[in-house]
Structures are given as C-alpha cells and as structure tokens.
Image (spheres, rainbow, N blue to C red):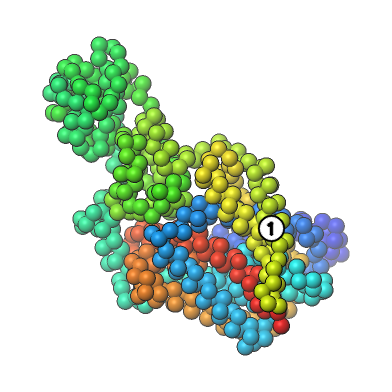
C-alpha cells in the first residue's frame, strides 16, 4: 500500500490514464444492446480509485482538458447552431429550449426546497439532463466565486457525486422514454407513423423496402445511330433517370457535351447514371460499344461532402436540386448521414447544415456540385493547430468576463467561453473551408480525451469526498434525478406535438437530440423499423449542447446568491 501511495504522490497521472482506459473499456460493454457510456464509467472508476489516497492535479491540467473538449463540441455544432436560427427549424429550436428551461426550473425548485448546496445542484443538472459538460462550466463558475480552498474542493466533490448518482439513471430513462413513452403520450403508433412519413418523403407513394435506397451508378459507351440529329438535352430527357452524356467523341476528337450539342451518326458517347435508366438507353441512342479507352478516360468518384451552404438548410432534396441547378447535372446522391446515422432518402427529405452527402459521379461533375453544397471531407487534412490554440485561448479570455444582475454575478467561465469560441470557429470554418481544419477523427480524439481526462481528474481528486456525499444524499438525488429527467421530456413531448404541431416521428428524434443522447435515436429507429426518427436529431442536438452546457454557470449563480 505504501508503494501505491508513493505513486499517487509522485505520478498521479498514471492513475488518471488508467481510469480513462478502464472506464473506456467498461463503457463499451453492452448488455442486451445497452451500454451506459464511457463518461459515466470513467467517473465511477476514478471515484473508486480515488479511495486509495489523496490525488492532486494542477488546475491548469483540468482547464486545458475541459476547454479542448467543449471547444470541439462547439466547433462541431457551430454550423448547425447558427443555421438553425431560421424560421424553417424554429419548432425544433423551441423544443430544445423548452427541455432545457424546464430542467433548470426543476433543479432550482429542488435546490430551494431541500436546501441543496451549489455543487450538488450543479451535479444534479449535469446528470439528470445527461450533459457532462455542465460539470466543467459549473466548476469554472465556482472557481471564480473566491471560495476558500477546502469549500471549493467540497463543492467540486458534490458536483461529481450528484452527477455519478443521476447520470446513469437519466441516460436509461431517456433511452426508454423516447421510443416507448413519448409515442404513448402522443397517442400514436411509431411504426405506423414512420411508414406514413416514408411515403411522404417518397412523394406520396407507398413505401417499399428498396424505394429509398440508392441504385448503382454506371457509365456505358454507345455509338450514335438512332439519336443522330438530336441534341444532348433531348436524348437525356428521353432516357430519363437524370442520366447525363458525359463525353462525345467524333472522328477521334472530343466534342463539348453541352446540352445544345447536336449528335451525329457515328459519334461515340459515354452515358452515366443509375443502372435502371442506362440499360434502356440503347434504343434511344444506338448500339452499345465495348470501348475501355473511352470509359477509362472518364474518372468516376464517390466523395463525402459536408453541407455548409445555409441556403440549403431545412430544404427538401427536391428544393436542393433546384437551388444547385445545373451544378447538380451528372451528380447523384448515394446517401445522406446525420450525426453519423443514415437518413432515409426521398424528394421531401430535408437537408440540414452539418449533414454529410455521399455524392457519386464523374470527378469534374462532383467538384462542380461540391462548391454549391459545402466542402469535401478529406481524410488527409491536418488539424490547424494555430487556429485551434487561438480559438481556445480567445474562449478562455472571454470566460474571465463577468457581470452582475442585481446581486448575482454571472460569468461563462473558461468552459462557457471555450464553447462560444468553438461555435464561432466552427461557423467561420463553414464559411471559409480553407481555414481552421479540424478533421472529424481529430474532433473525436480531442472530445474523448478532453472529457475523459477532465472527468478522471475530477473523480480522482475528489474521490473520498464524493463517496461521502453519495452516501449522504444518494436516495434523495435518485428521486430528484428521476423528476428532472422525465418531466422535461414529458413537457417537451406535449409542447412539440400539440402546440408546435411537429411530426411525431421527428419529435422522437428531436427529444433524443435535445437531451444529447445519441443512443435514444437508435432505440426509436428500432421500434419504428425505420430510419426516419433521425430526421429530427440535428438541430435540437446542436441547440441542446449549447443550452444545457450554459446551465452550469446559471445554476451556480442562482444557488450561491444566498
């Protein structure tokens, strides 16, 4: 035991890394398809390890780790957050605000009735509303109150205790509420409503098993005979299926394949498009020819494009095609993903900033369309460290600013400032893709390591006091946590369906997004036997991340004023 305590004193970072590793492994374990996630597991493991002795970590370590995490959250949500400030997505924004404000009111009521200290109230907020970032923003706000060192340490321990007791339960309740309880409150059958929505997205036709899936894109070569004397535009329209004549070769020379170009007998043309349309092209153009050289010179591509054009936000795919116009010629949408989940495709499927389109077509056509949509995701992009460092520094500086409302001092703290900086930097990146590269893989690494390291430091540094707080207030916290989780979800469901008139399937996805519980979307999709609940996730998730995170300083200001 003496050796362990010696390591704790001289190299506590070893245990911090062990807590991250063990918690991450445990968080990946699924029982019956359910896992409680790495964040809760890291905190529980670090609190248990914290019973071995007194761990001390420099405040600057925790500040940097949390700032990197919350900046990344803001960077990722920035384009969606600012794009969501439009009339087309107002209902989803209101839903996220309703859930956040309802949770805040309940926490403040409990804090007054049961005389909860500031740390416990903040921990209850973080856990019951399933937003881990509240721990950091609340801790930062507490640090600026000028509390004695021992009192500050106890308050931080109470935050960890409140979160540890209520998070797992809040997470489970959200997973169950979204697919099972919410549909009952709305009086609907989620599977039936999802089928109706799929039919609407498909243009009013009954949904079939494969009518929303992409059909294989192909390129074939033909020798013009039947199409002689016709323009490219006429032939493309007759074949249909958005097929495109990509190349015309006449007497060994290339002819520009403009829409008004007239085909002549003996021309060789390359036609691209969905397989089902191309196979019917021979009677319209002429016999198919085997010309590897002709086809080889037409490079095809499949590229993932991040949607960043605000003109496309909240528009249907039909509208997007019209807005992009001729730039979409010869380009096909293979899939649309939102929050890493595939979205069902149909003419009326809405596209949001932050979605990822998988486009298929010739390299030139895709490059032309990409400029109208956003920018291509390139796995070879390197993180712009200078942009990242300046952004985080600016956020931390903004977090130092405080102002008083009456006798209450309000401040964002370092975490809140970093969040705002991340939102702005993410938005700037969407406006100018040449600056501030932070690839998705780098975002995930910074987010996981930043939050995991911060949570482990909090758990280890306050393990003994947190365990005592859990023993003292455990049952009371459980009861309050159930209320703070379920009541906002209930109010949000009723407001969304009966007042905002949102589609019930979209409402289920929006509830999961507003609570920032990704797994609840999967549960709704499983019950609906459809991907349509994903349609409601993006905007509430972006807004929810911001709204719930800033609750930390608000709770601290409201509960410490007395």
Q: Position of residue 147 (x, y in %)?
A: 79, 73
Asked if residue 512 lies left or right of residue 240, the reply is right
| Residue positioned 15% across, 21% down in the render | 228
| Residue positioned 27% across, 20% down in the render | 248
Disc 1 target residue: 398
Asked if residue 192 lies left or right of residue 351, the reply is left
Q: Position of residue 319 (x, y in %)?
A: 31, 49
Q: For numbered disc 1, what is the local secondary structure?
A: helix
| Residue positioned 28% across, 12% down in the render | 252
Q: Between residues 439 and 426, which one lies in front from this camera angle? A: 426
State whether residue 158 appears in this view.
no
Q: Position of residue 63 (x, y in %)?
A: 72, 58
Q: Between residues 87 and 150, which one lies in front from this camera angle? A: 87
Q: Position of residue 110 (x, y in %)?
A: 60, 84
For residue 272, above or below residue 324: above
Q: Quadrant of residue 154?
A: bottom right
């Amino acid at each position: 035991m003496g050796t362990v305590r010696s390591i704790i004193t001289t190299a506590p970072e070893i245990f911090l890394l062990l807590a991250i590793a063990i918690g991450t492994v445990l968080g990946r374990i699924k029982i019956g398809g359910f896992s409680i996630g790495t964040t809760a597991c890291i905190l529980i493991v670090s609190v248990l390890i914290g019973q071995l002795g007194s761990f001390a970590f420099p405040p600057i370590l925790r500040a940097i780790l949390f700032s990197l995490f919350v900046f990344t959250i803001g960077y990722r949500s920035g384009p969606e957050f600012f794009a969501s400030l439009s009339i087309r997505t107002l209902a989803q924004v209101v839903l996220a605000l309703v859930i956040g404000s309802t949770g805040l009111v309940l926490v403040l009521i409990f804090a007054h009735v049961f005389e909860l200290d500031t740390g416990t109230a903040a921990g209850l907020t973080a856990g019951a509303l399933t937003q881990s970032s509240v721990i950091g923003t609340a801790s930062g706000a507490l640090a600026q109150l000028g509390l004695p060192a021992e009192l500050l340490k106890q308050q931080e321990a109470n935050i960890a205790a409140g979160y540890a007791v209520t998070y797992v339960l809040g997470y489970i309740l959200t997973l169950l509420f979204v697919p099972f309880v919410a549909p009952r409150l709305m009086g609907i059958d989620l599977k039936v409503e999802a089928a109706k929505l799929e039919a609407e997205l498909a243009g009013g036709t009954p949904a079939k098993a494969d009518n929303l899936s992409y059909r294989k894109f192909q390129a074939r070569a033909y020798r013009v005979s039947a199409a002689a004397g016709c323009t490219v535009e006429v032939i493309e329209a007759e074949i249909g299926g958005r097929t495109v004549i990509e190349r015309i070769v006449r007497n060994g020379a290339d002819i520009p394949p403009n829409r008004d170009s007239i085909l002549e007998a003996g021309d060789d043309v390359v036609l691209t498009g969905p397989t089902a349309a191309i196979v019917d092209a021979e009677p319209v153009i002429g016999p198919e020819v085997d010309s590897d050289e002709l086809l080889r010179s037409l490079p095809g591509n499949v590229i993932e494009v991040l949607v960043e054009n605000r003109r496309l936000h909240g528009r249907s795919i039909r509208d997007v095609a019209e807005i992009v116009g001729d730039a979409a010629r010869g380009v096909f949408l293979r899939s649309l993903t939102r929050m890493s989940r595939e979205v069902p495709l149909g003419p009326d499927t809405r596209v949001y900033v932050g979605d990822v389109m998988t486009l298929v077509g010739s390299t030139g056509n895709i490059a032309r369309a990409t400029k109208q949509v956003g920018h291509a995701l390139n796995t070879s992009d390197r993180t712009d460290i200078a942009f990242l460092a300046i952004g985080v520094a600016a956020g931390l500086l903004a977090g130092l600013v405080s102002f008083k409302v009456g006798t209450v001092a309000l401040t964002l703290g370092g975490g809140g400032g970093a969040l705002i900086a991340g939102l702005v930097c993410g938005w700037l990146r969407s406006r100018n893709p040449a600056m501030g590269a932070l690839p998705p893989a780098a975002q995930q690494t910074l987010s996981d390591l930043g939050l995991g390291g911060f949570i482990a430091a909090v758990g280890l540094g306050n393990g003994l006091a947190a365990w005592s707080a859990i023993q003292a207030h455990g049952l009371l916290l459980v009861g309050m946590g159930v209320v703070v989780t379920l009541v906002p979800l209930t109010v949000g469901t009723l407001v969304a369906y009966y007042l905002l008139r949102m589609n019930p399937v979209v409402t289920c996805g929006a509830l999961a997004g507003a609570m920032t519980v990704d797994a609840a979307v999967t549960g709704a999709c499983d019950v609906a036997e459809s991907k349509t609940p994903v349609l409601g996730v993006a905007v509430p998730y972006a807004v929810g991340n911001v709204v719930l995170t800033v609750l930390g300083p608000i709770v601290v200001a409201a509960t410490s004023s007395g």
